[in-house]
Image: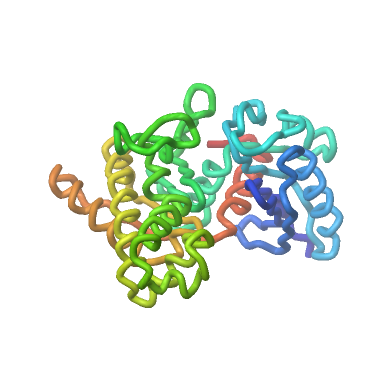
Amino acid sequence: MTTSVAIGVDVGGTGTKGALVDDTGTVLLRLERPTDVHAGTKGVLGLVEDLLGRAAELDAHVVAAGVGAAGFVDAARGAVTFSANLVYDDPAIADALRARTGLPVAVDNDANAAAWGERVYGTARDSDHLALVMVGTGIGSGFVVGGRLVRGFTGAGAELGHTVVERDGRRCKCGMRGCLEEYASGRAIARMAREEARSERDTAILDFAGTVDAITAKHVAQAARQYDEVARRVMRRAGTALGIGLANVVNVFDPEVVVVGGGVARAGEPYLGPARDELAQRTNEQRRRPVRLDVTTLGSDGGIVGAAALAFDARSGSGP
């Protein structure tokens, strides 16, 4: 029996992932290619064509395509308006995909797509009020309010990573100072750990990294799981900063659930525990109801599954 599927594509700074996804959110076939930082749209088109060619192997009929693109996206036009780390050779991704495939197409910001995936298929299924925070090298976020994605006037909304938590803090790549991303992201964790390791060499972080300059957030997480005090101190600082950011989210959006994903979230309790504690303390001080903090159940597939969910909506003529 032929299965109707959507193509979901997640464009990241280093890799572009795509998959054939059925209407239950199950990934039937997954492909990944290195991202060409100078030709992001070309990479999307090539991956979609590869997936279309492979669909017959699974007796699958592709009915729509969705793309979660890193950058600011005008979802109504399906076009990228700005991206700090990628060049899209044709910013009008939806038009380019429709012209090449003839399929209904949806294009949105990558974190928005992941948030929609959580609502349709993930741990926040059927919730009309949710916040998704993706913590990797940087921090991305997506918000659903009243059953609809929050995009802002120009598609540049929902940027939690660039909300300010320290007025005169560290300079961020976005140009401002004190952004949450500079205190709670994977890049921040690696930086803080290198600073600590230069002054305190007795740390298991160096056993995993080899040298101070080679330290990454992954090495810090590995050492933290071995109860290394330096690593756990760094994770505690980063997690506490994340908790402050999440408390701000609760104040602005009052979500039913906050979902955390991304590579840094896999560090587990050394990072998430302080975030949960900080969030609980701040909401309790305001006499707010407790807010559920969950880890994504979609894992690294959240972006592609969410893009596919948007594609199914595009096919039906509905959409968030």
Where 101 sits versus 136, above or below? above
Residue projecting furthest to the bottom? 226
- The quadrant holding residue 162 is top left
Confirm whether residue 24 shows in the render.
Answer: yes
| Residue at position x 29%, y 42% in the image | 250
| Residue 125 visible | no
Instruction: Name the residue rendered at 78%, 48% in the picture.
Output: 48
Q: Residue at x 59, y 34 (%)?
A: 84
| In the image, residue 202 above or below residue 304 | below
Identify which residue, 32 or 204, lies in the foreground.
204
Instruction: Name the spot of residue 97 as percent of width and height, x first.
Output: 78, 37
Camera-side residue of 128 and 271: 271
Picture quadrant where residue 99 is located: top right
Q: Nearer the viewer, residue 80 or 305?
A: 80
Residue 254: x %, y % from top left: 29, 40
Asked whether 25 or 226 is in front, the reply is 226
- Left or right, 296 with respect to 52, comes to left
Query: From what the image shows, is residue 117 above or below residue 313?
Result: below
